[in-house]
Image (spheres, helix red, strand yellow):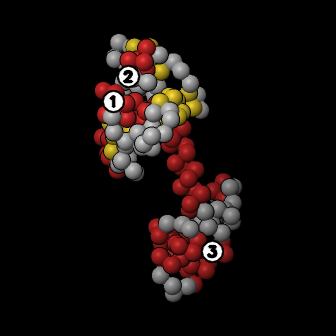
């Protein structure tokens, strides 16, 4: 498969994006049947579209631990000029610089759920932390929570989710 073959299976937008019209993974991500340069001598295989295009365009395998990511806002774009490759840290810097995921309600809700789940301690766990002389790092590892969560529990800034009364703020003392 060549870049021209891939381009022929795409819809070209005014912005220059090559919107893939073939198979998609999870209904979002292009899947391409192409040679995988990471496995020399191997036959063609189905792989992520950007990964396949990057390897076809450069003729080299993607270094271990690196990712290929889009630099445009089109998830199905396979234009090699709209891609970059690098470590996860590089992807993170790009995402932060462009603000790609800012103000996305689904991401905000998911991050809040993750934070609540990570911070959830029972009343017994909070009491044990407050009575213990062990360092917070030990408790954080033991309970699989952040050190900040342990610190908040130790300083009385955390209300246990298990014992919190949802109606507590409705009644005047």
| CB atoms of marks 2 and 1 within 8 Å | yes
Left or right relative to 171: residue 150: left
How many angstroms separate mark 1 from mark 3 (CA)?
55 Å
Mark 1 or mark 3, whichever is nearer to me: 1
Whichever of callouts 3 and 2 sits on the residue coming sooner in the sequence is 2
Q: Nearer the viewer, residue 36 or 16?
A: 36
Of tags 3 and 2, the one toward the viewer is 2
Residue bearing the label numbered 1: 57
Question: Could you classify mark 1 by the number of other residues whose Cα lies within 10 Å: few (under 14), some (14-19), or many (20 or more)?
Answer: some
Is 3 rendered above or below residue 51? above
- Percent coordinates x, y for residue 103 in the rendering: 44, 36
Helix, strand or loop for disc 3:
helix
Label 2 – label 1 distance at C-alpha: 7 Å
Q: Which residue is mark 3?
A: 125
Give x and y (percent) for residue 106: 54, 38
Please, is residue 112 above or below residue 107 in the view? below
**Dot 3, crowdedness within 10 Å: few (<14), some or many (≥20)?**
some
Q: If the image is split into quadrants, where does the N terminus sit?
A: top left
Q: At which x and y percent is residue 162?
A: 68, 64
């Amino acid at each position: 498969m060549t870049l021209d073959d891939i381009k022929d299976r795409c819809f070209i937008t005014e912005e220059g994006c090559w919107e893939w019209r073939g198979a998609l993974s999870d209904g979002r991500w292009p899947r391409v049947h192409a040679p995988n340069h990471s496995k020399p001598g191997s036959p063609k295989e189905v792989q992520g579209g950007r990964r396949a295009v990057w390897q076809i365009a450069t003729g080299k395998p993607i270094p271990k631990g690196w990712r290929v990511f889009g630099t445009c806002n089109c998830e199905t774009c396979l234009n090699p000029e709209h891609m970059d490759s690098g470590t996860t840290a590089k992807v993170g810097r790009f995402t932060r610089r462009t603000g790609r995921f800012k103000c996305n309600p689904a991401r905000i809700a998911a991050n809040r759920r993750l934070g609540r789940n990570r911070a959830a301690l029972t009343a017994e766990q909070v009491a044990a932390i407050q009575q213990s002389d062990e360092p917070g790092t030990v408790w954080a590892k033991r309970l699989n929570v952040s050190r900040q969560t342990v610190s908040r529990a130790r300083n009385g800034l955390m209300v246990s989710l298990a014992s919190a009364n949802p109606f507590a703020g409705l009644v005047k003392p």
